[in-house]
């Protein structure tokens, strides 16, 4: 009888231990599943955060294309062409004016050093080897240094006017495209309004749905035209500032050159 009770007790202990082990395994499995779900959720959140700006950029680009098409491709293409040509002219002027900028103070110091030694040809060579309108004006003045200070002054003033005209080249075309861009937009606005009234006449009703198409064309073309004009205007004002700076530099350099030539005449032509 004791053996029977002992066997029953041992069996109970084994069953209890087995259930405890199974419960621990179940808890560990559940913990691993929860951990895996947390990791997957974090990865998905990270992917969404990374992909969100890309999707937003794509949507903005797509919206611009859609609005461009909705604004009547004919008029929008004209506005785009005006912007492309205007920007090309602006970039050309900016590059040209940037190349015209030099250290005019150093140039005049080198010319003065050569003339103090009586080396006119050396001063001319310095001007020929230097780019820009200031060097060209100085070279024209040195070409006539033996003809008197009055002749040199007239030559410098005349050639300075030529160089100033070269600096302002193509600016009139840029102003043309600045004026054309909003004008083309307003033309699209008028065409859109006419289209809206045509739709009203055909439908015989002044509902928002009928008018919306023409009004959309009108507003989109106007917006794009004004944006293009604003962009070109910013570049145009920047170009004007560079032109004014170069003109001032040419005038100051011309006065300094005349002073240098006067000193040369006093020293070597007594």
Image (spheres, rainbow, N blue to C red):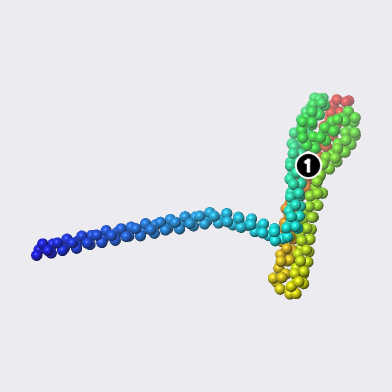
| Front-lying residue, 93 or 192 | 192
Q: Residue at x 82, y 49 (%)?
A: 172
* Total numbered labels: 1
Q: Residue at x 76, y 66 (%)?
A: 195
Q: Give residue 32's quadrant in the image.
A: bottom left
Q: Position of residue 171 (x, y in %)?
A: 80, 47
Image quarter of residue 8 = bottom left
Report if residue 259 is visible in the image: no
Q: Position of residue 259 (x, y in %)?
A: 83, 34
- In the rendered image, residue 61, in percent from the top left (x then y), is placed at 64, 55
**Residue ID for mark 1:** 246
Give the residue drawn at x 70%, y 58%.
68
The local secondary structure at tag 1 comes to helix
Pick the residue in front: 163 or 229.
Answer: 229
The residue sitting at the bottom extreme is: 205
* Horizontal relation, residue 154 to residue 112: left or right: right
Establish if 6 lies above or below 144: below
């Amino acid at each position: 009888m004791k053996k029977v009770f002992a066997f029953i007790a041992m069996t109970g202990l084994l069953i209890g231990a087995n259930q405890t082990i199974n419960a621990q395994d179940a808890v560990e499995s559940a913990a691993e599943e929860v951990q895996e779900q947390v990791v997957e959720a974090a990865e998905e959140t990270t992917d969404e955060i990374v992909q969100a700006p890309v999707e937003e950029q794509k949507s903005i680009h797509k919206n611009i294309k859609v609005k461009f098409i909705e604004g009547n491709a004919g008029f929008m293409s004209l506005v785009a062409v005006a912007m492309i040509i205007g920007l090309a002219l602006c970039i050309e002027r900016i590059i040209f004016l940037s190349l015209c900028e030099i250290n005019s103070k150093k140039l005049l110091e080198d010319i003065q050093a050569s003339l103090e030694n009586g080396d006119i040809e050396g001063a001319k060579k310095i001007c020929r080897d230097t780019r820009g309108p200031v060097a060209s004006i100085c070279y024209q003045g040195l070409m006539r240094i033996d003809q008197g200070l009055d002749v040199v002054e007239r030559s410098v003033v005349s050639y300075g006017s030529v160089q100033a005209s070269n600096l302002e080249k193509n600016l009139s075309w840029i102003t043309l495209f600045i004026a054309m861009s909003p004008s083309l937009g307003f033309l699209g606005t008028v065409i859109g309004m006419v289209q809206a009234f045509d739709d009203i006449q055909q439908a015989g009703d002044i509902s928002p749905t009928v008018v919306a198409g023409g009004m959309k064309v009108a507003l989109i073309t106007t917006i794009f035209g004004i944006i293009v004009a604003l962009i070109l205007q910013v570049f145009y004002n920047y170009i004007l500032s560079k032109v004014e700076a170069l003109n001032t530099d040419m005038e100051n350099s011309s006065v300094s050159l005349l002073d240098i030539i006067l000193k040369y005449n006093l020293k070597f032509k007594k």
